[in-house]
Amino acid sequence: MSVFQTIPKEYGIPKLLTISNQFVSFPTQSPLNVRTPKYVSTYHLSWSFLLTIAHILLTENDNNIADEDQVEIMREVVEYFESGYSGILGFTQMKPGWVELTQKANAGTSLKLSDPCVEETVSSWLQEERDMALILSRELGLLVHSGYRKFKNDLSSRVKYEKKELVSKRQLESTLQIDGAASPLQIRACFDRKNIEMSSALAPPQDKKTRGQMSWIRNQLRQAERKNRKLFGVLAPDIMVEIHLKFVKDPLRLHVDELDSAIESIGSHEIKSFSILYFKYLGRKFESRKGVVAIIEKMLIDYYQGILQHLKCWEKPAPQLIKKNEESEST
C-alpha cells in the first residue's frame, strides 16, 4: 500500500494536496496515477499556479491583501519564487514524442492511440495549455481559466479525448477563458501543416445587413491598428478573417486587405460568425521542443495585446419608442 492509502487511513485525512512543477487545468485533477481510499479527495497545484496567485494578489484589483506587512512578505515570496534558487519552472519544452509525431504527421504515417508519441504529445500540450493560462494571468492580473469543465475531475478522460482528436484530425486545440474579453481565445496546433493558430470568434451585428456587418468587423481591426500601430503592423501579414456562413461547411478565409471584396464571395449567404485568426507556419521550428514553446507563448501575448483586448461584442440596441402618427394625435 502507498502512503496515499495508509496515511489518510491512519490519521483520518479526507483530502490530500500535492504540489509540484507539473501542470493541471483544475486542482481536482491529479497528475499522479495513484490509488486512494474512496473517502479521500486528491488535489494538485503547480508552483507556477501559486506564483500566479501571488502576482494577482499584488496587482491592483478587488483581491488585494489589506495588511501592508503581509503585502511586503508576499513580495519577498514572489521575488524568491522567481529566482533561480527556488526550482520553480514554467513549461519549457515538449516531450520527445512531439518531434516524432510531427514527423509522422508530415510523412502521412498513420497514427494509433497506443503510440507512445501520441501520449507524450498530448501530455506536453496539456501542460503548455495550463502554462499559457498562467502566463496570461500574470500579465493581466486576473485568473485565466483553461480546460473543459466536463473533465474537471478526470484528467485521464481529458487525455483520452485529446488523443482521439490528435489521431483523427492531426491537431490539438485549447481554449482560454478570459473574464471581460469579447471572446474565448482558441489556440490550435496543426501537426500536418506545422502551423500554430490563435483565434477569437465574434457574432455579427443582427441589426445590419451583410455590407454593414463587413464594415463592422473591418472597423474592429482598424480600432486595433489605431491602438498599437507598431504591433499591429508586425501581426498584420499573419492575420486572417474567417467568415462562417450559414449552411456552408467551410468558412471563407480572407486576409484583412481582402475584406472589401468579400461581399461578392458571400453573395446571398447569411453570415453566422467571424473569427479573427492569427497564424504562423513554423516549418522545422515546429519540431523544436523548446523553440515551439517559446514561439507559442510569444504569439499568445502578441495576439492578446495587438488584437483580442481591442475587440468588442455587438450589443443589441435598446428598443426605440414607437412614433405616433401625427394625424391620430390630432383627432
Image (cartoon, rainbow, N blue to C red):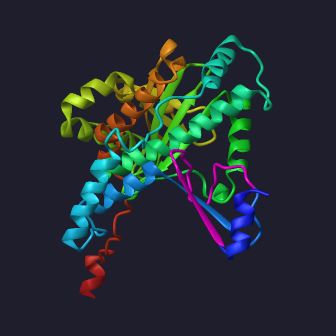
Quadrant in the picture for the N terminus = bottom right
> Would you say 67 lies left or right of 159 here?
left
How far from the left and from the top, in percent, is residue 288? 50, 19
The image position of residue 113, as x and y in percent, is 78, 32
Q: Position of residue 279 (x, y in %)?
A: 44, 27
> Does residue 201 appear in this view?
no
Give the residue displayed 46% in from the left and 38% down from the top: 199
Asked if residue 37 is positioned above or below residue 145 in the image, the reply reads below
The quadrant in which residue 170 appears is top right
Identify the magenta region. Answer: 14-34
Residue 323 image point, x, y percent: 29, 74
Based on the displayed image, in which of its 4 quarters is residue 127 positioned?
A: top right
Pick whichever, 206 or 218, lies toward us.
218
Looking at the picture, tell me which residue is in the foreground, 240 or 324. Answer: 240
Taking the image as shown, residue 28 lies to the left or right of residue 255, namely right
What residue lies at 37% left-to-right and 46% top-to-bottom?
136
